[in-house]
Amino acid sequence: MSDVNESRKAKFWSRVTVTKSCWLWARPCKNRLGPRFAYEGRDIKVGRMAFFFEHGFWPSGGAVRSCGNPLCCKPAHILDIPQKDMSEFLKAHGRHNAGVKPLKMSCKNGHPFDEKNTGQSKTQRFCRVCSREANRRCYNRRNGKSGNDSISVWERFGRVSVGR
């Protein structure tokens, strides 16, 4: 490696904190994509960078951490896994569903999503209680009723006699 690469390597390792189990990236992460290091005009993930500085070549597939810590830069923890085997490795280590949104257990009003209360449209689940309440409000608004009572607006303000 050239002197420039040695200086970048020294700068990289100066930003790593060594602990008992992992070597952690000690600098702040700029965005949600995780810790990165500027090298030859590109922002490179610190796991790939640590692998490159340790072995002298870039990982062919993905640089995956065996410890599962996204801030870890310890070369012994970073594995070069071919892209075709990546999903099997992540499934085996319980990290495959990282981008999948978990199903909600209740609606925004707190009603449980159980077999009795859950409806299904073409694209999404919905709460039957909330749907029923929304339909009732719409019906009352269209028919001149207010709230959950059955008294019309005219009866409420005394324009029509209640005793009929």
Image (tube, rainbow, N blue to C red):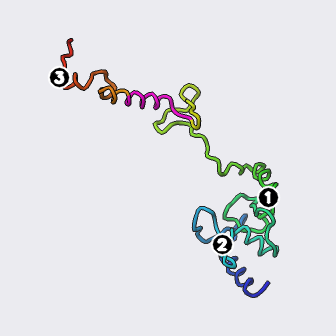
Q: Secondary structure at mark 2?
A: strand
Residue 120 picture quarter: top right
**In-front residue for pair 15/163:** 163
Horizontal side of 92 relative to 151 (left or right) equals right
Circle 1 residues within 10 Å: few <14, some 14–19, many ≥20:
few
> Disc 1 or 2, which lies upstream in sequence?
2
Q: What secondary structure is found at the residue carrying circle 1?
A: helix
Which quarter of the image is occupied by the C terminus? top left
Q: Which residue is mark 3?
A: 159
What amino acid type should be assigned to the residue bearing mark 2? Asp
Q: CA distance from mark 1 to mark 3?
A: 75 Å
Closer to the camera in the image, 118 or 10: 118
| Residue 7 screen position, x and y as percent | 71, 84
Question: Is 152 situated above or below 75?
Answer: above
Where does label 2 land, which residue?
Answer: 43
- Image point (29%, 27%), residue name: 144
Magenta region's main secondary structure? helix
**Distance in Å between CA atoms under marks 1 and 2:** 21 Å
In the image, farthest residue toward the top:
164
Alpha carbon separation for disc pair 2 and 3: 73 Å
Residue denoted by label 1:
83
Answer with left or right where residue 38 lies relative to residue 63.
Answer: left
- Number of the front mark, 1 or 3: 3
* Span of residues in magenta: 125-138
Amino acid type of the residue tagged 1 in the rendering: Gln
Measuring 65% from the left and 76% from the top, which residue is drawn there? 38
Choose top left, top right, bottom left or bottom right for residue 156.
top left
Q: Is residue 58 magenta?
A: no
Residue 154 x, y percent position in the rendering? 22, 24
Earlier-in-chain disc, 1 versus 3:
1
Quarter of the image where the N terminus is located: bottom right
